[in-house]
Image (cartoon, rainbow, N blue to C red):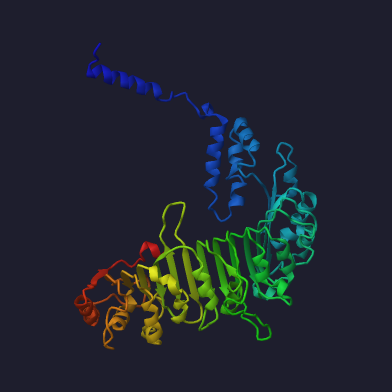
Amino acid sequence: MRLTRSAVLSQRQGSHNHLEPSPSTTIDILPEDVLLEIFDSYRQAFEQEPRYERIWNSNNGWFKLAHVCRRWRCVVLESSSRLHLRLVLTSCRPPRAVMLTRLPPLPIIVDHSGATIQEWKEENRAATALLRYPNRTCGITIKRSYLLSDVSWVCMAMNRPLPILESFKLLNDSGYEYEFKVPTTIFKGSAPSLRRLQLQCVLFASVSQLLSSTTGLVELDLDIDTIVSLSPAASLLTHLQGMPCLRHLQLRVLRLPSPTIYIPVLPVGAADVVPLLRLTHLRFSGSTTCFEALAAGLAAPFLQDLEIELNYYSHAFPHLSRFIGDVDGLFFAVLVDITSSAPRISMLTHSHSIDEPPRRIAIKNGMTWSAPICTAFGARLTTVEQLFFQWSWVYCNEAPYRQFHQDPIAWRRFFEQFQNLKILRVGRELLLNVARFLSLNSGEPPLPLLPALEEIELRSAVAAQSVAPPIGNIEREEVLSTLGPFIAARQQAGRPVRISWNADPALPSPYW
């Protein structure tokens, strides 16, 4: 029997209608494993929030799911591990909330980072929770302030076994004049599950013993006064070398080295370099001496994000050069900002997939700019294809000419490292300076400098609130005239370079 076209369409329409849900269909038809997947996706939407633990474990998180109906409540509570369920005790939520009879014995997070002095005086709730439920406490966050600078009684409460404690944060809101000496009794009863540790404004000598016993850390955030101790075995470098699981490391050593404190920096090759193979994120802020002392004995080949802010000038970075040289990946984009107040250089690798984001290395020098900080990248610059050169201090009337030409020989050596550079992007404030630098006034041949260069992108727009006026026709002609000898020489040598103008004030996406 041969079906007509209208009959076929009629059958398809009937089949389609059969698949459409009935108006009476509800979410109750979904099996529990599907509901669990939906709930977990809902939880993951909170993970990027700064206060994820507090938000998810509140009325805006899994509480809302558990109050929909009895079935949902059972699915949520029976999957407490998968859904990362916690009971968060704050200054507004007393420990007696844990005694709710209809709740399973969920892990407890003690978060008193927002407590006022009146609430602290009413009841030492953090210590009370620790005393009552040490076997259930998985996270502790305490904040010191001007009014409440002594939290040693909380630390004393942790002088007991805390078998499932994963995170401890001692925050500070009282300035560096209130550096805290952590009691040596903290975690004396052991915390074998501790993975995340954050200590702000503490004396390194008071936490050295603690760091020696927490070798399983995955995340470490320290704000300390120094990195050395009376004994070399108790130095910060020694402690870091004993943390093979470390993934995220953030260090701030904001106090300048004292003349009375000697920080040894061994020559390159003189120290045993210990690789931290799982370290993917490192942020450091402090003096060049401190970082050089740490880099002398560490390597992190699989870093994805490295940010260094140096607040003390130096002419040489031998260990920084070796440390950067050990990082895996080929860099293709570089941003150089020679602003006198906050000069920086950052590098990016290609992103091969969503699961493999680009690697980034950034160095900021808080004192002054110098070409040697660029040369610390060494051979890593030979693979770079894009270079963005800018001056971004929008509130400064100082001409960047002096910064760029204070050491022309060093800058020339810096540019000579870009053997594969194809695109040179120049910010509005540096157009004439870079054009003069590339000119052939010195009579030097054009090819040794940027031999693979194909394009110079001149950016005519300025950043918002910049004191520099938009480029005019006269200045535009002067820039092109200054670049003329360089362009003509490259054309004659068979390596033409094209000039383009870009009026977009925003940075290209690779440099964000």
Q: Quadrant of the N terminus?
A: top left
- Give the percent coordinates (x, y) of residue 491: 20, 75
371 with respect to 322 (left or right)? left
Is residue 410 at all visible to an observer of this figure?
A: yes
Is residue 475 at all visible to an observer of this figure?
A: no
Q: What residue lies at 74% left-to-right and 48% top-to-bottom?
A: 136
Q: Report the front residue among 34 and 278.
A: 278
- Give the percent coordinates (x, y) of residue 21: 43, 25
Q: What residue lies at 43% left-to-right and 68% top-to-bottom?
A: 347
Give the quarter of the image for residue 436: bottom left
- Give the percent coordinates (x, y) of residue 286: 58, 75
| Total numbered labels | 0
Q: Report the front residue among 232 and 500.
A: 232
Q: Quadrant of the C terminus?
A: bottom left
- Give the percent coordinates (x, y) of residue 176: 65, 74
Give the quarter of the image for residue 386: bottom left
358 with respect to 429 (left or right)? right
Q: Report the front residue among 381 and 272.
A: 272
434 with respect to 96 (left or right)? left
Q: What residue lies at 55% left-to-right and 75% top-to-bottom?
A: 319
Give the quarter of the image for residue 495: bottom left
